[in-house]
Image (cartoon, grey):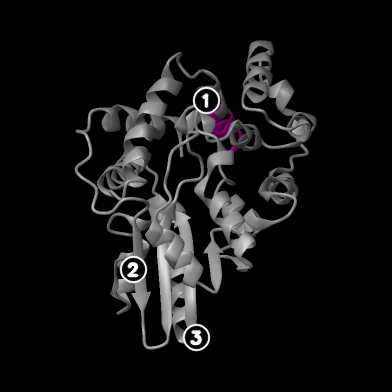
Amino acid sequence: MGWRIRTCLATALIALAAPAHAQEPGLPIWVVKDADSTIYITGTIHRLREGMDWRSAKLDAALDESGELWLELAEIAAPGGLMEAVHPVLERFAAHDGTPLSQMLTGDENAALHAALVKVGAPQRVFDNLDRMEPWYATYALGLSQLMGGSYDEKNGIDDALARLAIEKGIPVRGMESIEDQIALMTGGSISDQLEELRIVLKAPPGLGQAMERVSDLAYGSWIKGEIHMVEALVAMMGISAGATGGSTDALLYDRNANWADVVEELLDGSGVSFIGVGAAHLVGQDSLQVLLEQRGVKSKRY
């Protein structure tokens, strides 16, 4: 998602009214059932502030009932951690044998990039690889901290917590898609376009992080209380902003939701109880997973 989209989201969401009363405490959960299958579906947040409480008795009961947990990536539950599995794939997709990145940036831009990577805690292998990668690799390495604000940390992510709970309970963790599927979403675009995106990120105005934290507090603070309208507004603004710049969110949302609807139908063809946790943005709006399932005759309801 481009920088212009992010700043537009910040402006729009900060202006929104405070969320209404929650339908249910804890994360919103939907359930899909047939004669011999039950599938619970909830929306995760990949980074949260410390202490943001999203657990509920309903969620725990649904997970306890389930025989398997499906997350976007099975590697979230890997012993070495997700990033250990992601980095080799990133390096394969981003490999570049042309002009090194350091020679495409000015001295000041190189210094700013190094300082920003240090600030977000990028591992040493990122610094070692920069000159052998396309510019989008550096933008990716700066991570969601630019989007959600520095107080939002992946160690507090709901996906990771669900994976740990599943492991404790002896529940196998499966993936809705592969790491390659996700990395492919970030590739493409000319080197010059990638450089422009990186430069815009590096020139983030002071105070933007605080503004983005406010956006995250509004959207995700309401989501973990069972409310959906703030995240729905966020997704709507993503679509509007992408369209205004000639882009689309189809690859990020619609196409993946369609693929995941296939997974849900396959689970329904079998039997048993499954629990699915995917990014909250996939469960709101006109292209949500639930809407696409309903178009196929598979109905869901709030649990």
Q: Residue at x 57, y 63 (%)?
A: 177
Residue 290: x %, y % from top left: 33, 66
Q: Nearer the viewer, mark 1 or mark 2?
A: 2
Disc 3 designates what residue?
270
Which mark's residue is nearer the viewer, 2 or 3? 3
The three-letter amino acid code for the residue at tag 3 is Gly
Q: Quadrant of residue 21?
A: top left
Q: Amino acid at mark 1?
A: Val
Residue 142 located left or right of residue 283: right
Figure check: 78 above or below 258: above
Is residue 193 within the magenta segment?
yes
Q: Position of residue 245 (x, y in %)?
A: 36, 37
Q: Is residue 33 magenta?
A: no
Find numbered disc 3 in the image and state the secondary structure of the residue it sits on: loop
Part of the protein shown in magenta: 190-197
Is residue 254 visible from the viewing direction of this image?
A: no
